[in-house]
């Protein structure tokens, strides 16, 4: 036992003071900024992270730009949300990227949704119900507990791929876990007064958040996933909001704010701009900053319209 | 399992906890502390285990090893030219006044194994008499793990020449094929049996070099040894099969792309095609092309809108026609000559707001005067259109064509198009 400790200490001294070889950082590509934020939190100085989707654009419809082919060609790790979120644009990019490391089943491929308890998994496939994802709702990162699972998975895989940086990944993961546990208590406290509050969202992209914080999404402005709001449906939403005493509508930067404003005016409510991606709001770059902003904005909105 | 361990540890700690103060020694206190630490670690492990249990993946084995997709196009419209086929030369264009089903295709794709991907595209179409035609449009495999960034594709393939040629009809932005592609590659587009080797260059920006090697014979090798070549050179055909390297087509292409800003992308390409034609022994054809694609997409794009894109392709052909007997009158010998043709199209698309795209295409084709009379006349066409996508699985399109044919005159056509897509989501390359 003692000898191991001495060895560890010696190793630590060597790592700290010995001649450091130019460390090759893991080249990590994340499909969306939220996954990239976790990769940066865990990988720290041992990784170099690139992002494919812009924080402000609809992650379902990213252009399969040739520059992304180059990025993917040179990647050691690809972190994707999975659950068909990137289905429309990632497959042709990967085919052109010809990179075995990040091919399906490759050591460098991390599918964030694997191991997550997915919500709204359909029992049958039917596009008359709109653009329903067959593996369930892909917006799972809105539940901090899911972010914790994803962070753990990223740490595990980073360690496998770069054992020399294992200590960095472990320390960063432990810090992430501890911060998240503390923050979650804080976020729950902030939203506790609004338990059972009713909200409306544009798309079905806040269901995980609602479940975690005991908030109810009574309607979405889209009549079905991916289908633009119709006048009849908007009227129905207004009715539901009045009946359910809901006054808050959550929209993301790429969603149609005008429709949300029209509805908000009718119900004496408020439109809250809540991007789900770090980088879309000034000063919000980490996952914790994102959730801080989200929880505080939501709490303030709910308080104001109470 | 860990749930069984935890109460036992708790009991042990409780008993020991009572005993410890009585012992009163520093050593015992140390042991208690270490046990507490272990207990906390155990609790943490249990928490994580129970969390993972509740996070059991809700995946279903689909048992699906292949994506299956089906798309169908239907056209309806009217043209001032009664013989619509003389105006709309493309095989998947509207063919008659009234209704046309120009393309119903079954697309199959998937991973063959860890080393190959497979793709097949089978097209059904109804001709102007309502007769069903079937074509094996494409069927090929692509390697997934060749070293040094190489990739090989082989089978029945569209030649990688420019942008439009490799697109299947459902991915077209207009109802019909550009005139310059009709002129250079015939009604069906340029494809044949062969292989394509591609190399992704190790440059900081995207650059890809490829070369396709294909058979020169068959219906879909217009400009080379297609049986429809008499339309190009006006002479009787010289029969020839693939015998040696000289009988193959070579299609090199270089393409590069960069992003001038976060919201813009430019893609440029240069292509060429070289191979024998069937106007006589040792007669050959060269085609050169350049293409440009530029796209702007909003930073806050919803469903990919709004956007503006510009796509232009220019092509020139040099067709060495050997001395040959006229197809119309075998007693007349046509002198050896070089037939030169050229053309371009330029199209703008404006994705105004989600699911609505307005387009405008302008195009010209022409050729030098030659010693025989055949369909190489100068043509100009202007086509505004509007496409509405209820979802990405269906579309309505309306398109007006203003046509000018040298020596014939002007024509006006109005076409409506409807498309539906079943099954696998068709993801398109940029």
Image: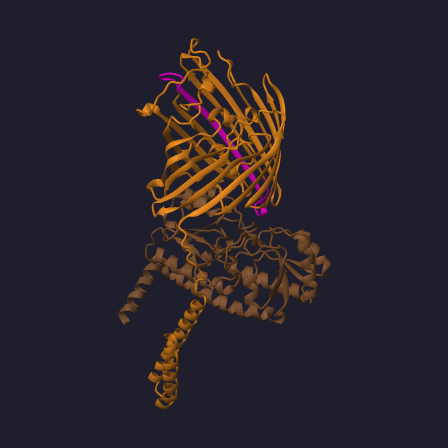
Question: Along the horizontal axis of the image, is B365 left or right of A152?
Answer: right
- Of residues A194 and A297, the one nearer the viewer is A194
Query: In the picture shown, does residue B128 fall above or below A158?
Result: above
- Residue A66 in sight: no
Q: Work out which quarter of the rendered image holds the N terminus of chain A and state it.
A: bottom left
Question: Along the horizontal axis of the image, is B340 left or right of A259?
Answer: left
Question: Along the horizontal axis of the image, is B327 left or right of B296?
Answer: left
Q: Colour of chain A?
A: brown
Q: Position of residue B337 (x, y in %)?
A: 44, 13
Query: In the picture shown, does residue A248 fall above or below A89?
Result: below
Q: Position of residue B2 (x, y in %)?
A: 37, 75
Q: Work out which quarter of the rendered image holds the C terminus of chain A and state it.
A: bottom right
Question: Along the horizontal axis of the image, is A57 left or right of A103?
Answer: right
| Image quadrant assignment for residue B138 | top left
Q: Is residue A280 magenta?
A: no
- Of residues A112 and B406, the one nearer the viewer is B406
Query: In the picture shown, does residue B180 fall above or below A38?
Result: above
Main SS of the magenta segment? Answer: strand
Query: In the picture shown, does residue A256 fall above or below B169?
Result: below
User: Which residue is at a point 44% across and 53% down the rendered structure image?
Assistant: A79
Q: Colour of chain B?
A: orange
User: Which residue is at a point 37% across and 87% down the rendered structure image?
Assistant: B15
User: Which residue is at a point 63% across and 67% down the rendered structure image?
Assistant: A197
Write down the region rendered in magenta.
B278-307
Q: Residue furthest left?
A: A3
Q: Position of residue B128 (x, y in %)?
A: 53, 30
| Image quadrant assignment for residue A97 | top left
């Amino acid at each position: 036992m003692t000898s191991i400790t001495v060895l560890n200490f010696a190793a630590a001294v060597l790592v700290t003071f010995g001649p450091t070889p130019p460390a090759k950082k893991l080249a990590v590509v994340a499909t969306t900024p939220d996954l990239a934020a976790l990769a940066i939190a865990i990988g720290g100085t041992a990784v170099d992270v690139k992002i494919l989707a812009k924080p402000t654009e609809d992650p379902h419809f990213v252009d399969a730009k040739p520059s992304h082919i180059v990025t993917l060609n040179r990647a050691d790790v690809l972190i994707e949300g999975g659950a068909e979120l990137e289905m429309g644009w990632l497959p042709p990019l990967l085919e052109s990227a010809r990179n075995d490391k990040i091919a399906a089943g490759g050591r460098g491929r991390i599918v964030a949704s694997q191991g997550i308890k997915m919500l709204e998994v359909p029992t049958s496939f039917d596009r008359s119900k709109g653009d329903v994802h067959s593996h369930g709702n892909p917006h799972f990162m809105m539940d901090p507990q899911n972010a914790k699972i994803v962070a753990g998975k990223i740490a595990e895989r980073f360690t496998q791929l770069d054992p020399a940086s294992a200590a960095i990944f472990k320390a960063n993961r432990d810090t992430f876990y501890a911060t998240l546990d503390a923050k979650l208590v804080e976020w729950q406290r902030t939203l506790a007064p609004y338990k059972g509050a009713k909200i409306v969202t544009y798309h079905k992209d806040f269901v995980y958040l609602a479940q975690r914080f005991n908030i109810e999404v009574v309607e979405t402005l889209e009549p079905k996933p991916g289908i633009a709001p119709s006048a009849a449906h908007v009227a129905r939403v207004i009715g539901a909001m009045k009946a359910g005493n809901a006054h808050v509508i959550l929209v993301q930067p790429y969603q149609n704010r005008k429709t949300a404003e029209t509805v908000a005016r009718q119900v004496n409510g408020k439109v809250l701009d809540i991007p789900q991606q770090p980088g879309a709001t000034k000063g919000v770059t980490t996952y914790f900053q994102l959730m801080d902003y989200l929880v505080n904005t939501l709490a303030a909105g709910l308080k104001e319209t109470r | 399992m860990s749930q069984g361990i935890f109460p036992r540890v708790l009991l042990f700690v409780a008993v020991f906890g009572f005993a410890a103060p009585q012992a009163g020694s520093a050593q015992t206190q140390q042991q208690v502390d270490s046990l507490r630490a272990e207990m906390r670690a155990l609790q943490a492990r249990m928490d994580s285990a129970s969390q993972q249990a509740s996070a059991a993946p809700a995946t279903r084995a689909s048992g699906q090893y292949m994506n299956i997709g089906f798309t169908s196009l239907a056209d309806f419209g009217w043209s001032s030219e009664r013989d619509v086929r003389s105006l709309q030369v493309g095989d998947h264009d509207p063919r008659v006044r009234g209704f046309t089903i120009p393309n119903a295709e079954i697309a199959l794709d998937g991973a063959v194994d860890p080393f190959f991907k497979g793709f097949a595209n089978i097209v059904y179409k109804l001709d102007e008499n309502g007769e069903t035609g079937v074509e094996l449009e494409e069927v090929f495999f692509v390697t997934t793990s060749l070293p040094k960034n190489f990739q090989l594709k082989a089978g029945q393939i569209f030649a990688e020449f420019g942008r439009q040629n490799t697109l299947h009809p459902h991915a077209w932005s207009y109802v019909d094929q550009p005139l310059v592609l009709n002129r250079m590659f015939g009604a069906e587009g340029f494809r044949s049996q062969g292989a394509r080797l591609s190399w992704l260059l190790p440059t900081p920006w995207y650059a890809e070099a490829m070369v396709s090697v294909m058979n020169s014979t068959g219906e879909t090798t217009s400009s080379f040894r297609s049986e429809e070549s008499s339309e190009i050179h006006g002479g009787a055909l010289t029969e020839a099969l693939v015998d040696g390297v000289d009988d193959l087509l070579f299609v090199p292409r270089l393409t590069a792309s960069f992003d001038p800003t976060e919201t813009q992308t430019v893609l440029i390409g240069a292509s060429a095609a070289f191979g024998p034609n069937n106007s006589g022994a040792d007669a050959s054809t060269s085609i050169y092309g350049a293409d440009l694609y530029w796209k702007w997409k909003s930073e806050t794009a919803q469903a990919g809108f709004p956007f503006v894109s510009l796509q232009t392709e220019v092509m020139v052909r040099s067709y060495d026609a050997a001395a040959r007997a006229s197809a119309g009158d075998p007693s007349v010998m046509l002198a050896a000559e070089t037939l030169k043709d050229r053309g371009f199209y330029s199209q703008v698309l404006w994705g105004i707001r989600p699911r609505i795209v307005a387009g405008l295409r302008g195009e010209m084709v022409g050729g030098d005067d030659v010693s025989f009379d055949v369909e190489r006349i100068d043509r100009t066409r202007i086509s505004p259109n509007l496409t509405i996508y209820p979802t990405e699985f269906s579309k309505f399109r309306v398109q007006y064509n203003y046509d000018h044919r040298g020596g014939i005159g002007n024509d006006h056509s109005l076409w409506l198009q409807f498309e539906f897509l079943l099954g696998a989501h068709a993801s398109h390359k940029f």
